[in-house]
Amino acid sequence: MGKYTIIRIACLLLLVQVPLLAQKTAAVKKYRVAVVKYQHETCTFCPGGDTELGDWTRLRPILEGDQVLTSGSFIRGFVKQGREYPDIEMVGISSPNSVFGGSSRSWNSKASFEFFMNRIVKELKTKAPVDGVYLALHGALAVREVPRPEAEIAKRVRAAVGKGVPIVGTFDLHGNEDEEFLKWADGAFVTKRYPHYDAYFQGERAARYLRSVMRGKYKPTTATRKPKIITATVLQWTGKSPSMDIMERARRWESRERGGYVSVFYGYPWSDVPDVGATVHVMTNDDQELANRIANDMNDFIWRMREEFAFGKYPMPKEAVQNTKKAITKGDVPVVLGDYSDRPGDATWILKELIDQGVGGVLYGALRDEKALDRLSKSGAKPGDSFDMKVGGFTGESAGKPVRIKGTLKYFGPGLGYKQIAAVEYGNANMLILTPAYEQIRFPRELRIGSVDPEQYKVFVVKSRVHFRRGFDETGYAKTIIVVDAPGPWVGTTRLNALDYKYAPINELYPFMDRK
């Protein structure tokens, strides 16, 4: 056979193959996936009144269209993974963005919930049909007259898209859930690390899972268990046992059993809701026996860890500051004081003690005082002006008393996502950051405000339980970490029995139940 004959045959084969390839490409089914975000960690015991629609739009407007697809780590992970498949098309559905005051805000009003849900449902119907729905949730949303908000979200979405459309959600491990969510949805993926390093990863997992279900490769079969334990969030750090061991056990099950997914909610005790406390969700591929076996094992393991998991002891401010001075003397700096119990953000216990004991080189980031900021604004204050005000300590007994700060205003302007914050230099080379709402600082770099240089300070005070460890502890930045308690049985402390629960079945949960 001659060379030119071979070339002619090859050309004929290409002429035949190209249309076939085109037909195959055209035949690839496209899966349209709706993406919805509705996240809030609600402190129902916090003061300040209900969270209304205006609180949801004060900092940022409602997310629309493609804006939704870049909002937060969970969603970015989901979208990145989904777009790696040629058959996935993302459809952003208008969603609430973030609440002014974050997790220091109290009950969401039913009116705000209905507003957002009506808009979400309407848009789902307008943009129909969709082949799947991804819900980026938190798990600790609390809404007046809506006992299980995330389950209600899934229920309404289910009604909008129909029975055959799979729904999957991602959650924070502080979520309060039970079996109700999985009655309406087909899967739940929960962060296994606190701080939540794996939110992006859980988003990716949710995308792979949802695609498998849409393609008929996975038949969701679920099991839910409630270990009947409630714990303060400061005890849920996954860098320490038993929290570390619980999440590792979940990962081992997932590694051993192909198609098995194990999610553990530790719960959020500051939400007075009927599904408060720890929860285990398991998904398997059409294997109910396996789902039940995994769920039972996880439930029993968590129960065996209950005593160590539900109790903790931390120094009070006086002792914590004494230990801080010892660390400074030894050169074990910087020192980070985690004010773990302050949910509203204006507690002054540690600030007062640092002043009383004469500690210098302190960067306090941050104290909530919108009233002080308002006074600065009305007076036309500018950097270099003298500062003399009582700050903080205004939300009740748990916040302590206002503390007088005399010094110099070093910065006054936008920062930390707010229109106005302030930095006040006072005492022995100390710096106080004032914000209009509770602010949880996670990284030293967040405190580079104006001329403020975090590297110049020996002591940091942060309003945080665990998340601060991400930038101050687990990076090796701080030499000394002290989590500080507050006097009194306030909201936020490990002494949960001081809270006036009305809807949570607190008498059925350890350590409130009979400990026989």
Image (spheres, grey):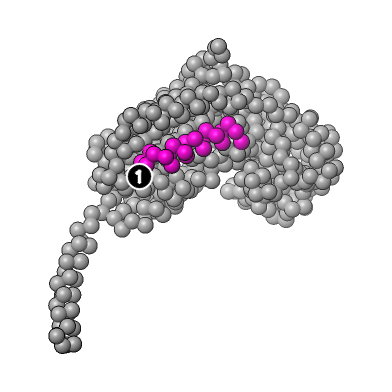
Could you tell me which quadrant the N terminus lies in? Answer: bottom left
Asked which quadrant contains residue 17, the reply is bottom left
- The verdict on residue 250 being magenta is yes
Q: Residue at x 45, y 22 (%)?
A: 274
500 or 112: which is nearer to us?
500
- Is 128 situated left or right of 43 in this image? left
Q: Is residue 402 visible?
A: no
Question: Residue 407 location in percent, x, y?
Answer: 80, 45
Question: Residue 238 location in percent, x, y?
Answer: 57, 37
190 or 400: which is nearer to us?
190
**314 up-or-down from 136: above or below:** above
373 or 392: which is nearer to us?
392
Q: Is residue 302 visible?
A: yes
Magenta part of the chain? 240-260
Question: Residue 192 location in percent, x, y?
Answer: 50, 39
Q: Count of labels shown? A: 1
- The verdict on residue 334 being magenta is no
Q: Residue at x 80, y 40 (%)?
A: 327
Question: Residue 97 location in percent, x, y?
Answer: 46, 44
